[in-house]
Amino acid sequence: MTRLTILEYPDPRLRIRALPVSDFDADLGRLIDDMLETLHASRAIGLAATQVDVHRQIVAIDVSHGGDAPQVFINPQTLTGSAVGLVEESCLSLPGIVDNVKRPTRIRVGFHDRTGAPQVRDLEGLPAVCLQHEMDHLRGILFVDRLPLISRLRIRGRLRKRRQETSDRAGNRTASQARP
Ligand code: NI
């Protein structure tokens, strides 16, 4: 298994809409295994294929923290949603950003499993919220897009400042290396 590289905001590839999976073959199985490896290695609870630059409708979640309860959703569709609540979210593609997002906390989802068999599952609480966050990725949506404008502006400013600091550090390193 291979640990995959995760795209980070503002990479434009995070905005690509994923296409449905139609071939449930060995390549798909390998990709899913790599996504699960990446998810667990990152100590995250959810990963969408979009985040590893594969634009297919595949989501892996594992809210167990022990890495022993992975769930894979292919071509997921929300069938019903209820009990809207405010839950704290973060994202591997937006390191260091945490904020509260309003979503249904109870959903029924239809999807294909890794063999291509259609399934329906009811999710509640963290798994429900996590899956919706990942399904947003498949549509090119980041959780910060769902925040009020004032929060988005604050986060955008913070990310810009951090990128500036990173590039300044890289610049200083290059300058010192160039010194005779
Ligand atoms: Ni995310």
Image (cartoon, rainbow, N blue to C red):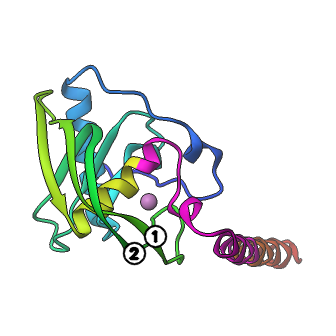
**Magenta-span inclusion, residue 147:** yes
In the rendered image, the vertical position of residue 108 relative to residue 145, given as above or below: above
Give the quadrant of the C terminus. bottom right
Quadrant in the rendering for residue 104? bottom left
Comes first in the chain, label 1 or label 2: 2
Which residue is pictured at 65% across the width and 45% down the height? 12
Give how far across and how far down residue 115 sits, in percent.
Answer: 11, 29
Left or right, 12 with reference to 128: right
Disc 1 from disc 2: Cα separation? 5 Å
Helix, strand or loop under label 1: strand
Q: Are marks 1 and 2 in contact (CB under 8 Å)?
A: yes
Which residues make up the magenta segment? 136-161
- Location of mark 2 (residue): 86
- Residue at the image position 58 percent from the left and 59 percent from the top: 145
Q: How many marks?
A: 2
The image quadrant where one finds ligand 1 is: bottom left
- The residue that mark 1 highlights is 101
Q: Is residue 26 left or right of residue 5?
A: left
Q: Is residue 17 above or below residue 125?
A: above
